[in-house]
Amino acid sequence: MSTDLVTDPARERGAATAPLLSVRDLRTRFRNGREIVPAVDGVSFDLHAGRALAIVGESGSGKTVTARTLMRLLPRTATVAGGQVWFNREAARREEPGPGRAAAPSRRAGRRERARVVADQPGRDLLTLSEREMRRVRGRDIGMVFQNAMEAMNPTLTLERQLTEHLLWHGVCGKAEARERAVRALGDVGIPEPERRIRTYPFQLSGGMRQRAMIAMAMLTEPALLIADEPTTAVDVTVQRQILDLLVEVKSRGTGIVMITHDLGVARYFCDDVVVMYAGRVVERAPTHELLDAPKHPYAVGLLGSCVELGERHRPLVSIQGSPPDLARRPQGCAFHPRCGQAERPRCLTDQELLPISAGREAACWKAVTDGAER
Ligand SMILES: Nc1ncnc2c1ncn2[C@@H]1O[C@H](COP(=O)(O)OP(=O)(O)OP(=O)(O)O)[C@@H](O)[C@H]1O
């Protein structure tokens, strides 16, 4: 998949800002016995500060593996076979800390700050950092929020230990200030009585509270980028809304967010752009409303047709025929062609790059482009 075709909407609109994150031709494989499974196969996209990008697609399409590759948190059986992950933390538009928020860095923190400036100059490729450098970036410049907070938090430590140790480890502030900041962070995410709650263990909190505590932890260091993998799947609708509102606020402070979601309603509510993945590749990328209102790639059309969004209960659902391919035996050409009602041989048996459709919009389907694809 060509990387040149990934257009930069902000640049097209004349914005002078560089992307916060530029993913180029990312390839991640699993070894499964004798088989090689190309779970992520040439994925490219950009994300600007203060914007949110949704990655959507059926189960097994490669969303989580993409996110974990960005963070370099992959199982041992996985290998990054190629690509670049340019992370430009200087591109983040930071809000000045409000009164009482500014942290006077400790001497140790000052040293770490200097080390950090050296460690990740603007536009460093995360895939080339040493594991030590990456540990500094992870959790400090890039926050992570997962589907299940219990996986991300240590069940044997109180919130106080986890949050303060996180701050101390990243050299954000000294011990005396860490507790104060941790309490404030819990209050900021809407946890009532944060002074009392900070002394509890994760399992003593409700699911929604735990998700919020995890977001508080992810945001403690005011990261430039937040990667959220299905952060609202395990919570009820009311809590879901609260968490999304919280993330909207995080975004408005200039943090860029990559959101992996099954829920197109979440993408519509919260994300500026959407990337649709199928069989490890990006098949369509567009501004959210354009894509959700008029998808172009036949797979994106099918995906939207098979999902219900809030407020659309009466629309009949049409499932996509067939099932996703076994990635170890990827169909030749467009991997969706065996399920596509509009596939034409031999054209669809040829690999299809992303083709530009309009500003900030691309689809990996020649038909979607040539037909004008009023689907
Ligand atoms: N630990 C693993 N070992 C071997 N293959 C794996 C492993 N994890 C993922 N894969 C392969 O990578 C593909 C993509 O997985 P991934 O978890 O990224 O999908 P996903 O789109 O996030 O799905 P879901 O929405 O269900 O989480 C899977 O279909 C599978 O073939």
Image (cartoon, rainbow, N blue to C red):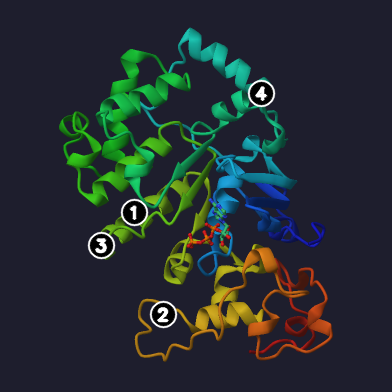
Question: Residue at 45% of width from left, 11% of height from top?
Answer: 106
Lower sequence index among marks 3 and 4: 4
- Mark 1 or 2 closer to N-term? 1
Residue at horizontal 44 percent and vertical 88 percent from the top = 317
Residue at the disc numbered 2: 308
Which residue in the protein does label 1 denote? 243
- Secondary element under disc 3, as helix, strand or loop, is helix
Q: Position of residue 267 (x, y in %)?
A: 48, 65
Q: Secondary structure at mark 4?
A: helix
Could you give the CA–CA distance between mark 3 and mark 1, rounded to whole angstroms? 9 Å
Disc ID at residue 311: none
Q: Which residue is mark 4?
A: 119
Task: Work out whether mark 3 precedes mark 2 in sequence or the reverse, and give the earlier one.
Answer: 3
Q: Nearer the viewer, mark 3 or mark 2?
A: 2
Identify residue for label 3: 238
Could you tell me how far apart the alpha carbons at marks 1 and 2 are, in whole angstroms?
20 Å
